[in-house]
Amino acid sequence: MLGERLAELRKLNDDTQQTLADKLGISVWSIRAWEQGKSYPFSNVLLAICKLYGTSADYLLGLTDIDPSDEARKQRQRLTEEEQNEMHRYEEYLLWKRKK
């Protein structure tokens, strides 16, 4: 369940496995293993994924079918392309700043 939902969220956010790995500061092999159900992230990484994609651990783990990021995604779709690009640049800046 986690692997399927992680892959779905990653793709909906236009992230590749490599980009997600970079954002989380881990190897792409970890992302691949999670998405294939061969292993699972540590709790601190699971929390980082939830924050990154605006969802809950309950959703990622399959404990609920309600994805809190759905509403955020709908709101983003109502933004102009310029606003979406600006928001993406701001998110990248915040992730960069977090790594410092």
Image (spheres, rainbow, N blue to C red):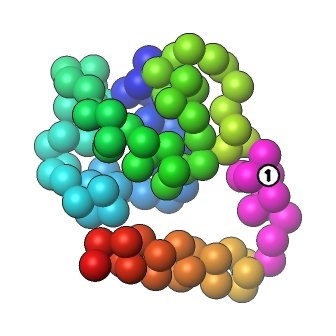
Residue furthest to the top: 63
In this rendering, would 72 be left or right of 2? right
Residue 62 horizontal side relative to residue 85, left or right: left
Which quarter of the figure is the N terminus placed in?
A: top left
Answer yes or no: is residue 11 visible: no
Residue lying at the far right of the rendered structure: 78
**Number of numbered discs overlaid on the protein picture:** 1
Say above or below: 42 vs 11: above
At numbered mark 1, what does the secondary structure look like: helix, strand or loop? helix
User: Would residue 91 be visible to someone looking at this image?
Assistant: yes
Amino acid type at circle 1 is: Lys
- Which percent across, then down, holds residue 47? 42, 42
Query: Above or below — where is 13 with respect to 59?
Result: below
Question: Is residue 95 shown above or below 49?
Answer: below
Please identify the quarter of the rendering in which residue 76 is found: bottom right
Give the residue at mark 1. 74
Q: Toward the viewer: 98 or 80?
A: 98
**Residue at 81% over, 58% down:** 75
Q: Position of residue 94 (x, y in %)?
A: 47, 76
Mark 1 Cα-neighbour bin, 10 Å: few <14, some 14–19, many ≥20 = few
Q: Position of residue 21 (x, y in %)?
A: 26, 55
Q: Residue drawn at (19%, 21%), measured in percent from left and top? A: 38
Decide whether residue 21 is among the magenta residues: no
* Quarter of the C terminus within the rendering: bottom left
Q: Which residues are magenta?
A: 71-80
- Residue under the image location 32 percent in, 42 percent down: 44
Which residue is drawn at the image coordinates 73% and 81% (left, top)? 83
Q: Main secondary structure of the magenta part?
A: helix
Quarter residue 3 falls in: top left
